[in-house]
Amino acid sequence: MARYITQRLVYMVITMFLIATFTFFLMKFLPGTPLSAADRLSEEQQAVVLAKYGLDDPVPVQYFNYMVNLVQGDLGISFQFDNREVTTIILDRIGPSLQIGLQAMIIGTLLGMLLGLVSAIYHNGFLDYGSTFTAVIGQSVPSFVFAGIFQYFVGVKLGWFPVALWGTWEHTVMPTLSLAIFPLAIAARFMRTEMLEVMGSDYITTARAKGVNKFGVVFKHGVRNALIPLITVLGPLAVGLMTGTLVIESIFAVPGIGDQFVKSINTNDFPIIMGTTLFFAFFFIIIVLVIDLLYGIIDPRIRLAEGE
Amino acid sequence: MDNHKPNKDLFVPVDTREDDSEKISRPSLSFWQDSFIRLRKNVGAMIGLVVLILLIVMAAIGPSLNEYDQFEQDLSRAKMPPKIEGMGWLGMDGTLSTVQTNDSLDQAETNALMRFNNDEDYIETTVLNDGSNGEPAEVEAVYDVYAAKDMEEQNFWFGTDGLGRDLFTRAWEGTRISLYIAFLAAAIDMVIGVAYGGISAYYGGRVDNYMQRIIEVLIGVPNLVIVILMILILEPGILSITIALTITGWISMARIVRGQILKLKNQEFVLASRTLGAPDGRILRKHLIPNVLSLIIINTMFTIPSAIFFEAFLSFIGLGLPTPLASLGTLVEDGFQSLQIYPHILFFPALIISLIMIAFNMLADGLRDAFDPKMRE
Amino acid sequence: MDNLLEVKNMHVSFDTYGGEVQAVRGVNFSVKKGETLAIVGESGSGKSVTTKALMKLIPMPPGRIKEGEILFEGRDLAKLSEKEMQKIRGKDISMIFQDPMTSLNPTMKVGNQIMEGLIKHQKMSKAQAKKRVMELLELVGIPDAESRIKQYPHQFSGGMRQRVVVAIALACNPKLLIADEPTTALDVTIQAQIIELMKDIQKKTDSATIFITHDLGVVANVADRVAVMYAGKIVEIGTVDDVFYNPKHPYTWGLLGSMPSLESEVAELYAIPGSPPDLLNPPKGDAFASRNEFAMQIDKEQEPPLFKVSDTHYAATWLLHEHAPDIDPPEAIKKRVAAMATNSGKGDRS
C-alpha cells in the first residue's frame, strides 16, 4: 500500500509539472499581453507594465519564477482586474462552485444509488425498466439542456425558484438539480449492474441458506459489496461535475469559478484562464487520488493485503 | 400405469452406435450472427438506430428542404416563432402568447398588450380570471407575429433567430457539422488508440512499459483542461475542435485494446488453438479480431456522443465555432440568450442534440449487451 | 413414519429465452433421520438443482417448482411462503456449498457470518452467539478461534474457508444437512480432510445428510444410500452395497466403470459415449437410450418406470422388465465391481 501511494504521488507530481510547463509555454505563444488593450502607452510606461508582470525577463527566468510562484500558490496577476491576484479571485469565487458541486454530487449519487438498488431488486420488472430508462436519459441529455428546461419551465413559467443569480438557498436549487442528473444516472446504472452481479454471487445464496430475510440479504450482504466498486466512479463523476459547473454557472449566473472562467475567456484574461485551468487540473488530480486511496481503505481485501 | 404392460415386440435391441448421441442439437452461429440476432431483439437499441438514421438523413437533406439559406440575415423577420401549416395544434402556429397577472384587471390587460408593443390589430386578449374572486386578475394575450409582419405566406418551421436566419436550415446544418466533428474525432481516436494499444500489447516488454508510463501521466490530465488549452492555441474551427477532442480521446481506446489483447494472448482457448498448430493468421482472424473489434465498436459508439457534448460545451464557454457557422453547440448557446421570451430558439437544437445523445447511448448499450460473451447461453 | 424428508414427483423447470428447461423431471426419494443419502451423477444431471429446490434457493424466476411435494417432517415445503421458508433455512435444513472461495461474504467478518443464523433462529445474544461460534470453530477444526472470528474470508485458506462454511451450516444443529459437492473445488489433500470432518460431524451430531457428488469414491466412504441421477431423473437408488455391488442400470455401470482406482488391476477405464441430452427438448422415451449400448426399441418409445430389485433397491431401466433379454454388465465392469468388493472386504466398510 505504501509503495502504491508513493508511486501514485510521483505520477501526480509529474503530471502536475507537465501541465504547469505546458501552460506556461502556451501563455508565451498566445497573442494577448497586458499591453494589447493599451497601445497608446509611451515606451517607459510599457516597460513599467511589462516589468509589473515580469515579462521583461528572459524566458527561462520567467519560467523559473513562474514555477517558484506556483509552488507557493501564486498564480499571477489578472490583466483585467488591476492588481488582483488570480489566487485571490479563485478563492473568492470557490464558495458557490463548491456548494453547488457538492450538493449535486451528494444528491445525485444518493438518489442514483437508490434508483439503481430499486432497479436491481425489481430486476426485469416495471420499476427496473422505468429507472433504467430514466438513467439512460439522464446520462445522455447534456446538463445544459436540463438547465434550459428548468430555467424556462420551473423558473419562468411556474416561478417556483429564481431564474438566475445567487443569494438564498432557493438560488442553488436549479443549478444543483441540473448538475445532479448526470451523477444520478451514472450512479444508478453502476449500482444496478453491481447489485445484480452481487445478488447472483454464491455468498448471497449462503446468506439465504442461513435463513436471512430479504431485507438482510439485500442490505447487509448485498449493498455493502455493491457499494465498494461504486467508489471508483466517484472520481470521474467529480471531473464531469466540474465540466458541468462551467456551463451551469454561466447559465444561472452563479458567481463561481466557472462563471469567472467563461467571462475571462471572452475578455482574453489569460492569467485567470491559465490559473483556473491549473487549479482545475490540480484539484481533480488530487480528488481522483484521494478516491482511489479511499477505495483501498474501504475494501478489506485490499486494506488487509498489507498486513500479511 | 399402463407403462408396465408394453408390447413384447419392443424388447429387441437396437443399434445406437450410429445414432445421434454425439450430435450437437442447436444450430451453430458465428459470433457476428449471434450478436446481430441479439441486437435485433433489443428494443432500445433498435429505437436508437432508427432515430439515429432519421437524424442523419435530416442532417443530409434538411437544409435543402425549404427555400431559406442558413446565413441569410434579415432583421425584419428576427425571432419569428415556429410555424408549420397544419401543425397549429402542436403550438407551432406562428404566434407568441403571454399571461399577465395583476391585482387590477385593467393593468393586467395593459401589460399583456404592452408585451407585444400594443400592436392591437394582431393581439387577441382573453381574460382568464377577472379578479372578482379575490385572486389576482389574469389576462392572456396571443400575438400573431406572421400577420403583424405581413409574412403570412412565409413558413419558418423552427422559427428564426435574432438575426432573422431560418432555424430549420441552421439546425440541420448544425447537426451536420456536429456529427461531422464527432465522427471525425471518433475515427481519429480509433486509429490512434488501436495503433497505440496494439503496438504496446504486441511488442510487450520495455516498449510496452514505456508506452504505459506515458499513458499513466496523460490519464491524470483532466481532458477538460487539455481541450481548453488546445483551443486557446489553435483558433476555434472545425478542425481545431476535432484535434482538441482527440488529444486525450484516444487514451481510453488504447487502454482497452491493449488490455483486451494482453488478456486474450494468454487465454486458454488461444493457447489451445496455438498448441493445435493454428497459424498466427487464423488465431488473429478467429480469436483476436472478433474479441477486440467488438470492444472497439462499443467504445467508438460511446466516443461519438461524448464528442458531440464537448463540441457543445466549447461553444458554451466561448470557444466554439466562430460565427456565422452553426453547430448544435453554437445554436444552443445562442438559444440561451433569449430563452425567457423566445424559448423556441433553444428548443429545437436542444431537442436534436438530446435525441442524438440518447440514440447513440441506447445503441451503444445494445451493442455492448449483444457482444458481451458473458450473456451467451 | 421415520422419514425426515420425502420428495414426491418433484419437477423443476427454468424458463429461458430458448424455452422451458426441464432440469428436474419427476424425482422421488426419502431421507431417514440420521441417514446419509448420496446423490451422484454427471454435470447437468440435475442433482444440484434438486437440492437447491428443496430449500427453495433456486432463483425464482426463472426457476420454478412445477409440481410435486417436498415433505419435511410432514410439512410440504413446496407450498410454504418465502417467509416461512426463512424460518426453516439454516435452522432445520442447512447447506454447504461447492466453492468456499466464493460462498463467503468478502466484506463481513467470519465470526459475524457464523453468528448471523444463531442470532436469527435461536434468538441468542451477541455474547452467547460468540461462545457458540467458538465451539463451532473448534468442532470444525479451526484453531485460534478467538482471533480468527475477527478476520475476513480472504485471510483464510481454501480448506479453512470450507471449514467455516461447514460451521455456518452446523450452527443451529440442523436436522438435515445438504452438502453440494463440498470437496470438488478443493485440493485433493484438503478434500480428504473435509470428508473426514464431515464423517466426524455425522457421528457427533446425528444430522441426516444429503451428499451431492460426482466422486464415487467419496460416496462409498460417507453414504448409507445412493441415488444415481441422469437427465433430471433418478435412474437407480439403493443402499451403497446395492448400487456398488449389484448395479442394474447401464448408466450406473458406466459411472462405476469410469471410476479410476489405484488398487484395481483393470487398466482400462470404461467411458460412456456421447453427452447428456438437451433438457430444453428432452428426448422421447428413455433419456439415456442414445448412449446406451443395450438400448432396445422400447427405450426409444416409452420412459421406463422404477423397477423394484429388492426392498431397498430400485432402477429405472427396461432391462429389468420380464420381457427383456437377460443382459449382463460388460466384462470390464464386472471385474471392477469384483475388485471393489475384495477391496472393501479388507477395507474399512462394515
Image (tube, rainbow, N blue to C red):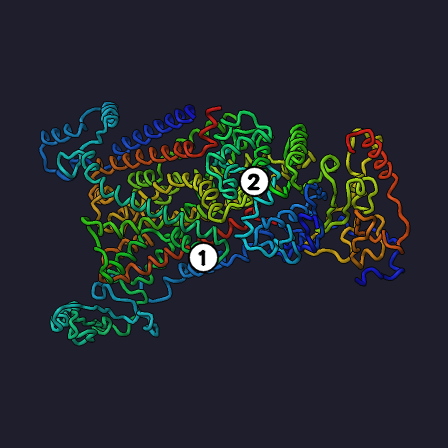
Hey, which residue is sitting farthest front in the picture? C1
Q: Which mark is residue A138?
A: none
What is the x, y in percent for residue A217? 49, 45
* Residue under the point 64% across and 50% down: C73
Instruction: Decide: few, some or many residues near mark 1? Use Cα within 10 Å; few <14, some 14-19, many ≥20.
Output: some
Using the image, name the chain to which the residue with label 2 belongs: C
Asked whether, in this view, residue B249 is left or right of residue A246, the answer is right
Residue B129 can be seen in this image: yes
Q: How far apart are the alpha carbons under marks 1 and 2?
A: 38 Å
What is the x, y in percent for residue C150? 47, 30
Amino acid type, callout 1: Leu
Locate residue C158: give its quadrant. top right
Asked whether, in this view, residue C55 is left or right of residue B198, the answer is right
What is the x, y in percent for residue A128? 46, 55
What is the x, y in percent for residue B250? 43, 40
Q: Is residue B72 above or below residue C129?
A: below
Q: Is residue C132 above or below residue B243?
A: above
Residue B279 can be seen in this image: no
> In the rendered view of the protein, which quadrant contains the N terminus of chain A?
top left
Asked whether, in this view, residue A234 is left or right of residue C143, the answer is left
Residue, disc 1:
A127
Residue, disc 2:
C172
| Badge 1 and badge 2 in a common chain | no
Q: Is residue B358 above or below residue A96?
A: below
Using the image, name the chain to which the residue with label 1 belongs: A
Locate residue C242: give its quadrant. top right
Q: Secondary structure at mark 1?
A: helix
Amino acid type, callout 2: Cys
